[in-house]
Image: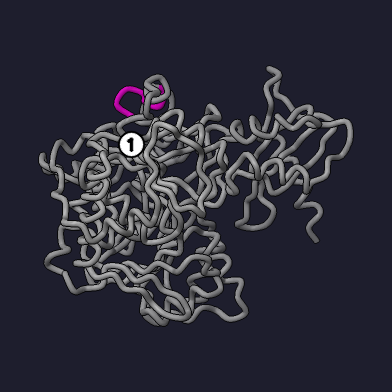
Amino acid sequence: MTTLTTSLFDQGPPPPCPQAFNMAAHVLRLADKLADKPALEVISATGVQIWRYSELKSAILGTATGLLNAGLTPGDHVLMRLGNTVDFPIAYLAAIAVDLIPVPTSTQLTEPEVARMIATLKPAAILHDPAVPTASAPTSKTLTTQDLLEMRNLPPAEFSLGDPNRPAYVIYTSGTSGQPRAVQHAHRAIWARQMMFDGWYGLQPEDRLLHAGAFNWTFTLGTGLMDPWTIGATALIPAPDTAPAALPDLLRQHQATLFAAAPGVYRKMLDAPAPPALPTLRHGLCAGEKLSEPLRKGWNVATGTKLYEAFGMSECSTFISASPEALAPAKTLGQPQTGRRVAILADGTPAPLGTPGVIAIHRSDPGLMLGYFDAPDATSARFDGEWFLTGDLGAMDAQGHITYMGRADDMMNAGGFRVSPLEVEAALLNHPDIATLAVTDVEIKADTRVIAAFYTADHDLVEADLKAFAAARLARYKQPRLYIRLPVLPTNANGKLNRRALRADFETQTLKATP
């Protein structure tokens, strides 16, 4: 085993990406060979909807033809306002197949949030499920789910092959400035994901991988769908509104061999009266927020299987992880995956071993974003020479294992989504009775963090009214769960709002109040 002398772990280089490349073609590369094999099973307690590889590819390429017939041209942005159904991945890959640029979005976004995206991206089309909120866009075509359904049987489009560095898709992440950022990714991003197959998943073609997330979550799109399809495995997705308590039965009935979910899902499954009995499960995969040691150990005791954690972000997906072949010592995230070059930086250079610093990934990584759309200054601010700065803190040991030490800024984690407190504060400060406001995430019990809003006002405000005010302006995952009135908000020596002090004071008081 390699022994490091500084906090720089070089697991590269990755295999080179083909120069004539298309992300959707890569995902579907085995579809003809595996024509009759189930690619996707949408499962519930009452039945299963099966999509075979041949059916999936036909629907994707027929939809791609339909999008072009609708007048869209390569390079156009296509905003996706679709629900938690199979329409989502079909439309997503259809757009990429013919060099349109899809923008997947959460159904939880409100009309004002969508309007800001439209103003930035100026999409040529909006793919719209009438049950999902959207905003008016006079210059955009609107294609409904019925329109998309009718496209599936059209003659198949040809995959558009080209430079792997050209834009493929855009996803939104909460920016540290308070404004969500449009993250542009290249076609090569899917090529980088093969480093997770052994470095995190232990994924094999015969696997049946159940992902607990919705179709329209990027964690599900990557780990739950595209990666299994790339290797020729079967993806299992629970039907909409499946409760965590129902997942053990679905895992067992549908013989899942791998399971992927955010830590909160595992925690809810363990809260059931009886431990889950999962005879076919090899192990679980965990990402989106930090996995605690009690939860990791509790799952192992209850099920006899291990949980393997991965660390990543919207700008680079996951690049540090544990796996069946590379176990992580307790309280660490694991190691950089093979093909990655990762450092812990202090003052711009790799820190001494064991010394805290910013987790950084080399700018040559094929999974790294192209940049923030129409925001060159914001893009350049994330780089320090050859390194992309994640904004997360960590420390590295001599074997390259990385211990996570929190955020370098005030960004929050809400159920696997990164959220800027500035964005939430900007929305709530429009309330006429709030004088000052600070938002942060707080721990209310072991493994459970929620967003809390601390405000000053001349009287206590009705919490139900505050929640309704937030619901009209913010996606559900951005909305505070707690509203707490204080006489004054804490500041540091420079007069700057001190959110960390708020969090520490709240958690200290909560601990004192716990019997």
Residue 463 % position (x, y) = 79, 46
Give the residue at x 13% y 42%. Answer: 161
Residue 290 shows up from this direction: no
Give the residue at x 34% y 30%. Answer: 371
Tell me where the magenta segment starts and ends, as one range: 381-387
Outermost residue on the top side: it is 494
Q: How is the image coloured?
A: one colour
Give the residue at x 45% y 53%. Answer: 129
Q: Quadrant of residue 103?
A: top left
Image quarter of the C terminus: bottom right
Position of residue 99 in the picture relative to residue 380 (left or right):
left
Residue 390 counted in the magenta span? no
Position of residue 10 in the picture relative to residue 20 (left or right):
right
Which amino acid type is shown beneath numbered disc 1? Answer: His
Callout 1: SS: strand
| Residue that mark 1 sits on | 77
Looking at the image, which is closer to me, 440 or 375? 375
Q: Quadrant of residue 440?
A: top right
Looking at the image, which is closer to me, 330 or 360? 360
Looking at the image, which is closer to me, 504 or 419? 419
Residue 386 counted in the magenta span? yes
Give the residue at x 63% y 51%. Answer: 449
| Figure check: 240 above or below 436 | below
